[in-house]
Amino acid sequence: MFPPLPPDEAARQRAVDACGITRRPPNHALQRIVEQAASLAAAPIAAVSVVDRSRQWLAARIGIAVAETPRSESFCAFTILRPGEPLIVTDAVNDPRFAHNPAVVGSPHVRFYAGIPLVDRAGFALGALCVADTEPRVELFDIYDLSHLAREAERLMTQH
C-alpha cells in the first residue's frame, strides 16, 4: 500500500526544501540522537528521516545500510500524515499498510516500528525520528522519552 500524500503536500515539500537538511553534510548531533533512540527503545534500527518528493532520505541512521529509500516504501511517509501523533506498528506483518513492504518481507525484516513526526515551526511534518525492530512488540518503551529526542532533532533540522 502506497502512503497517501498529506493534504498540504505542496506546502510541506516547500518546508522540506526551505530547511535545507537534505543538502547538508552528516550531522553528528543527529547521529547521537539516533543512537540514543536505539538505546532507549532497545532497538537494532533507528533513524532520522526526511520525507522528500519521491524518497525518504535518512539524515542519520543505525542498523540500516542505505541512506535513502523510495517514499513508496517508507513507514515514515505514514508517520508524517499526523504531525502531532506518534505512529506505532506493533507487528508490521499484520498491518495491511506494511505487510507487503519490502523492508518487512525482506531485509531488514521490520516487524515493530515507532515513529515521531519531526515538525517545523509552521507545523509541517518534515520527516520522523523512528525506531524499528525485527521482532513484534506488545510492550512499549517510554514514548515520551522518544518524543523528547524528536524535539531535539527538530531543533537541529530547522537551524539554518
Image (spheres, rainbow, N blue to C red):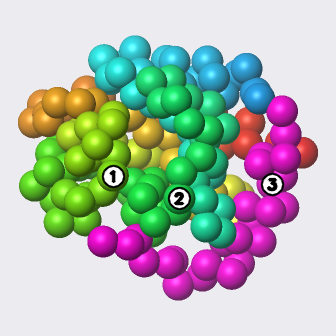
Q: How many angstroms separate mark 3 from mark 2 (CA)?
A: 20 Å
Q: Which residue does the image show at 42% across and 77% down from the upper left?
A: 4
Q: Which residue does the image show at 46% across and 66% down from the upper left?
A: 72
> Dividing the picture into quarters, in which one does residue 101 lie?
bottom left
> Dividing the picture into quarters, in which one does residue 27 lie?
top right
Nearer the observer, disc 1 or disc 3?
A: 1
| Three-letter residue code for mark 3 | Cys
Whether residue 135 is situated above or below residue 3 in the rendered picture = above
The region drawn magenta spans: 1-25
Disc 3 element: helix
Q: Do the residues labelled 3 and 2 touch (CB within 8 Å)?
A: no
Task: Please state which of residues 42 and 124 is positioned toward the viewer in this rendering.
Answer: 42
Q: Are marks 2 and 1 in contact (CB under 8 Å)?
A: no
Whether residue 15 is situated above or below residue 11 in the rendered picture = above
Location of residue 115 in the rendering, given as x and y in whole percent from the top left corner? 40, 45
Whether residue 65 is situated above or below residue 106 in the rendered picture = above
Q: Identify the residue under disc 2.
A: 70
| Three-letter residue code for mark 2 | Pro
Q: Which residue does the image show at 39% across and 34% down from the upper left?
A: 131
Label placed on residue 19: 3
Q: How many angstroms separate mark 1 from mark 3 (CA)?
A: 29 Å
Question: Which image quarter is the N terminus in?
Answer: bottom left
Location of residue 144 in the rendering, given as x and y in whole percent from the top left corner? 37, 34
Q: Identify the residue under disc 1.
A: 102
Q: How many angstroms separate mark 2 from mark 1 (CA)?
A: 10 Å
